[in-house]
Image (cartoon, grey):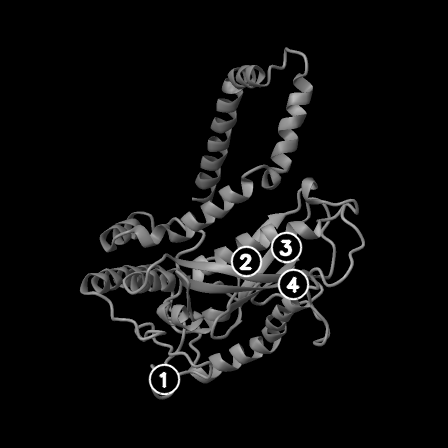
């Protein structure tokens, strides 16, 4: 059987090479016509195409295309009906999508990171021939939105349905601030990964932390949404002192987001609970938190009216579809946390995030026209 399998692969490879050899003259002719190799300046056109390919992420509108593709990729499953989901899973169960949707259980997944990969193009380098500090933020934008769509698409969808029936204006998530601390340089065309996760949240802001690290230098113990991927379980870990950063870290960034319905702020806890990412409270699930807000999505921030029957039905159908996706595709192996464990992690993150929140006071140190200026250039 092994010999037969090996012969089959050999014959397949031979057939492929034969097809390429037969088509080579036609391909060469088409490529020559496209590049106009027989005309003056053909070498420069070829070099320009190669340069553009090597710097795709820095071309005009490349960021917009990648950002839109990320949103479509992570939300396409939410557009399927239950019957289509089952049909898709039955026919294409051997195909492994890059991600299979958000977890739908209150668990440690709330604080787990998503990992995105990229590479430094030559157009992103400054005069020191390494990745310019200004180019980090475009990569971080994509990673953070990838994380939000992956983890909270269900909650944002339910919150959008609820609050659209209660208030005017559209439901949006907005970036309120970002800071980045650099540790090591990233050389031209050096690959890297961005690990983004929830750091903490308060009454207004959701804080995300992103670590830019050397690619393949660190592997997670498991992938919650992609259980087929190879993990770092069993591999020797890089030893480093506990009081020093991991040697693979290039830079670390913290960002804060706010959820808005028109001009009204929606507490992040409402969206997290709507995403089924928060465990039940010890006593009353609608009890007020220390921040003075109610946690249940059904509880209104300012006493607004309840959902209409039609909106509630749409919300229930959407929840059923998401639950069906989870039952069919997501393995139930995620560690479940109780409320106390979740609050400990949130408080630990808030001890760091509060320093970023204190930077809002910098708006008050703007001297405006009270003092002289050095000049205008």
In the image: residue 61, left or right of residue 41: left
SS of the residue under disc 4: strand
Q: Nearer the viewer, mark 1 or mark 3?
A: 1
Which residue is the extreme one toward the left?
Answer: 309
Q: Nearer the viewer, mark 4 or mark 1?
A: 1
Q: Nearer the viewer, mark 2 or mark 3?
A: 2
Q: Which residue is mark 2?
A: 115
In primary-sequence order, the first of circles 4 and 1 is 4
> Gap between marks 2 and 3, in whole Å?
10 Å
Q: Which residue is mark 1?
A: 287
SS of the residue under disc 1: loop
Q: Residue at x 49, y 63 (%)?
A: 223
Within 10 Å of disc 4 (Cα), the crowding (few <14, some 14-19, many 20+) is some
Contact between labelled residues 4 and 2, with CB atoms less than 8 Å apart: no
Q: Which residue is mark 4?
A: 252
Q: Residue at x 61, y 40 (%)?
A: 58
For residue 286, what is the image quadrant? bottom left
In primary-sequence order, the first of circles 4 and 3 is 3
């Amino acid at each position: 059987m092994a010999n037969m399998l090996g012969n089959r692969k050999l014959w397949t490879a031979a057939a492929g090479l034969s097809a390429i050899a037969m088509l080579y003259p036609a391909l060469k002719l088409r490529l020559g016509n496209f590049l106009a190799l027989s005309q003056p300046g053909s070498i420069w056109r070829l070099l320009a195409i190669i340069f553009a390919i090597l710097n795709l992420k820095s071309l005009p509108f490349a960021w917009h295309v990648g950002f839109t593709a990320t949103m479509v990729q992570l939300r396409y499953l939410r557009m399927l009906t239950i019957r289509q989901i089952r049909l898709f899973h039955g026919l294409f169960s051997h195909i492994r999508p890059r991600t299979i949707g958000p977890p739908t259980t209150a668990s440690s997944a709330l604080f787990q990171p998503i990992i995105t990969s990229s590479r430094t193009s030559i157009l992103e380098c400054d005069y020191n021939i390494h990745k310019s500090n200004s180019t980090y933020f475009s990569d971080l934008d994509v990673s953070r939105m990838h994380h939000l769509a992956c983890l909270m698409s269900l909650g944002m969808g339910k919150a959008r349905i609820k609050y659209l029936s209660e208030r005017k204006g559209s439901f949006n998530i907005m970036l309120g601030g970002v800071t980045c601390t650099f540790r090591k340089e990233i050389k031209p065309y050096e690959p890297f990964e961005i690990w983004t996760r929830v750091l903490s949240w308060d009454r207004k802001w959701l804080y995300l932390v992103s670590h830019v690290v050397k690619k393949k230098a660190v592997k997670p113990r498991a992938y919650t949404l992609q259980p087929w991927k190879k993990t770092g379980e069993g591999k020797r870990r890089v030893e480093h002192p506990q009081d020093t950063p991991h040697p693979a870290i290039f830079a670390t960034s913290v960002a804060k987001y706010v959820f808005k319905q028109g001009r009204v702020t929606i507490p992040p806890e409402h969206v997290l609970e709507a995403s089924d990412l928060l465990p039940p409270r010890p006593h009353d699930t609608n009890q007020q938190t220390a921040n003075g807000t109610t946690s249940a999505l059904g509880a209104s921030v300012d006493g607004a009216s309840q959902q209409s029957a039609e909106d509630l039905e749409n919300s229930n159908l959407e929840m059923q579809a998401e639950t069906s996706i989870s039952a069919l595709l997501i393995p139930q192996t995620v560690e479940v946390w109780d409320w106390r464990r979740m609050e400990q992690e949130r408080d630990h993150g808030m001890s760091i995030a509060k320093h970023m929140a204190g930077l809002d006071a910098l708006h008050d140190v703007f001297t405006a026209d009270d003092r002289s200026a050095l000049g205008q250039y």
